[in-house]
Amino acid sequence: MYTFHFFDWIILFLYILSIIYLGFIQKNKTSDSERSFILSGRKLSITGFIATLVTTWYGAILGIGENTVLYGIQTWLIFSFPYYIFALIYANWIAPKIRQAGYLSIPEQFRTYYGNKASIIAALIISFLSSPAPYILSLGILIEFLFGIKIGLALIISTLFSVLYVWNGGFSAVVRTDIFQFMLMFLCFFLILLYLSIYIASPIQMISTLPDSYIDPLGGNTIQYILVWFFIASWTFIDPGFYQRCAAAESPETARKGIFFAICFWAIFDFLSITTALYAVGIVSPENALLAYPILAYKILPAGVFGLFITGIVAVLMSTIDSLSLICAISFGRDILWRIQPQPEKLNPLIYIRRGLVIISIISLFLAYLLPSVVKLFYLLGSLLIPGLILPFLLTLRENGKRMKNFGVQWIILPIIISGIWFVISNLIGNPLFNIEPFYPGLISSLAYFFIKRKGTHSWQLK
């Protein structure tokens, strides 16, 4: 356990009060309507768009530190660069289409193009892919480490405080808190890098002292391993956080420009966070790599500044937990629980979204307690589930949906089954089957299924 100074406690307490005010007290008067609760009335300004997209996307901040301490600059190649590429594609092609289409969620779009069953399956997959469990785990570990609280209680605290204001204010509450958390995340990493540069060494001097393995872009791994991470970044195309913010934007142009600005801020923050983690090499042991940032901060930052840095880390984690909890609540509550009712149009979907929030929080809390490494979990879920959704979603942006309802379910499920079988066999033999990672056969099977069906169905015509 690390000792918090009085000034550190004051800063953390002020942060909690700010979140309570922004999330609970400053409530949008129209947040009781479905569209306002889910999309903030489709009036999201470019400032709110940038802040909420940037903060939500950075929930794996402890994983960034962990991977950098273990593998060096490889972190940028697998967690940063690929996402810039796919985000640029998203901004130019997908974002305007989403805003113009007018759907509330990805499963709702699937329902129009592939039917109700495919929509429910997509919602279930998104609920797993977007689970806040890894981030609840990260925040719980941080609380346990700093304050000596047992991990079970730390996870409960992480969950409750991060989602209560979502229940109250929906997406509007998420945006308000994210703007504040956006400022904190940049401020805290700018300050620690400034202290490191002044009191330890300049970044250039620090990098010159690192072992060669930390400057290796591959980090000692194979090119195929790096490429899988690159393709996992294609998750951007079906990321419900991207979708929600584009659907909520004031206009298609707001969504497009907002993503361009977000990429710039990600690049700046990547430099700050990865460079900071490189300073921890040799100071933080591999066993404590997940806690590289708080350990390094405790060693070099004075009282008050240390509290501000830790508060910034907490803000980054909370901004992701609240956003993903809302997204999962919408997917599970509205797109599954509400849709399976006999006459859903006569029922209030907000009731089911809030029920979904409770269920998802409990499931995420349970998963967080059982989770292995955060980075390994991202790799596993991405490899197995992304191949089932990415091509069907992209085709909804081009195809006439009325002609695709007869095989949407199979197209989603088949790649996941193939990737899953490939993963199981690979684990049984101790190496990837034929030295091919599970992601590739899943994606190839999705492509093959599409071309076979398209060839056999004369009504399939690209617009």
Image: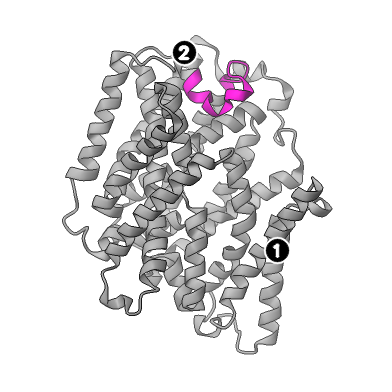
In front: mark 2 or mark 1? 1
Q: Which percent across, then down, holds residue 357?
A: 35, 54
Write the start and end of the magenta stretch as one range: 278-295
Query: Badge 2, how many Cα within 10 Å: few under 14, some, many 20+?
Result: some
Residue 223 falls in which quadrant of the image?
A: top right
| Vertical placement of residue 318 versus 343, above or below | above
Q: Which percent across, then down, holds residue 77?
A: 64, 40
- Work out whether residue 324 can be spotted: no
User: Which numbered disc flags the more N-terminal residue, 2 or 1?
Assistant: 2
Specify the amino acid type for callout 2: Ile
Q: Which percent across, then down, holds residue 63?
A: 55, 35
Residue bearing the label numbered 2: 300
Decide if residue 246 is on the left or right side of residue 415: left
Determine whether the residue tagged by mark 1 lies in a helix, strand or loop: helix
Decide if residue 172 is on the left or right side of residue 454: left
- Work out whether residue 16 can be spotted: yes
Query: Badge 1, how many Cα within 10 Å: few under 14, some, many 20+?
Result: many
Q: Residue furthest top?
A: 199
Determine whether the residue tagged by mark 2 lies in a helix, strand or loop: helix
Determine if the magenta segment contains residue 24. Answer: no
Q: Which percent across, then down, holds residue 323?
A: 38, 49
Determine if the magenta segment contains residue 290. Answer: yes
Residue bearing the label numbered 1: 418
Picture residue at 60% right of the left edge, 30% below the top:
68
Of 43 and 329, which appears nearest the observer?
329
Specify the amino acid type for callout 1: Ile
